[in-house]
Amino acid sequence: MQKKFQPPLSAMLLSLLMFTVLIGLGTWQVQRLEWKTALLAQIATRMQQTPMPMQETIYNPSAWEYRRVTLTGHFLYDHEFLVKPRTLDGVNGYHMLVPFQRLSGGIVMVNRGWISDELMPKAVRPQGTIQIEGIIQQAHPGYFTPPNNPQKNDWYWPDVNAMAAAAQLATPVPVIVVIAAREQGVYPAGGKVDSNIRNDHLQYAVFWYLMALISQVIFFIRYRQPPAA
């Protein structure tokens, strides 16, 4: 004999609520997937564009992020900042940030690349007026990033304003220029552009949709009752 499906009204309402929430979470992840895919495509396009001279003033840093730019001026090596901890090929080290004074007089913080304590004596420091090419990035501390301590010259993320203040320099533009190319055997090692943005939203969407389906299967099994004798 066939079993009957007779859930109480309260259980039906609870199941419907749970199903709606789980479907909503899955749909939100699909929307995030579309946004993240478009963002990654935009980043790839910007990083492949022909370099352009960087504007003197940047009012909308997000509109410039990941664009290739050129700068002409000279490095202020008296004010090198080592941001830690950073690794390259499993070796601990730093990212070396150096203020770059443009011919116009403006200051830009430049991430020259990775270097370790052992390689510090081999650091190359081009002198005089030069032109550099790099990729613009914005600097933000991660959720677990320790706070900087400018008084002790301890830096865990590149706070350009705090670095300029510590060096008693004019306020820099609100972005960082990361040296785009890496020359073999030359340190600091450039090319440390952080564009590895995770895109796990498809997996999350599948997970929530699957949870919605499972919740209904469990609900159905729970309230299938044998027929009355």
Image (tube, rainbow, N blue to C red):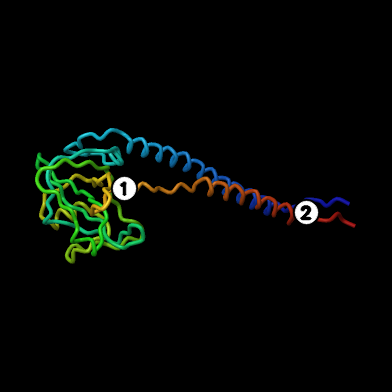
Of callouts 2 and 1, the N-terminal one: 1
Q: Nearer the viewer, residue 73 or 58?
A: 73
Number of the front mark, 2 or 1: 1
Which numbered dot is residue 193? 1
Which numbered dot is residue 86? none
Q: Amino acid at mark 1?
A: Val
Across and down, in percent, residue 103 comes to 10, 40
Q: Nearer the viewer, residue 96 or 171?
A: 96
Q: Name the element at disc 2.
A: strand
Across and down, in percent, residue 75 comes to 13, 49
Q: Quadrant of residue 151?
A: bottom left
Side of 140 relative to 124 (left or right): right
Side of 118 relative to 31 (left or right): left
- Name the residue located 89 percent from the left edge and 52 percent from the top edge: 1
Label 1 Cα crowd, 10 Å radius (few <14 / some 14-19 / many 20+): some
Across and down, in percent, residue 39 comes to 40, 39
C-alpha span from label 2 to label 1? 57 Å
Question: Which residue is denoted by mark 2 in the rendering?
Answer: 224
Q: Nearer the viewer, residue 143 or 195?
A: 195
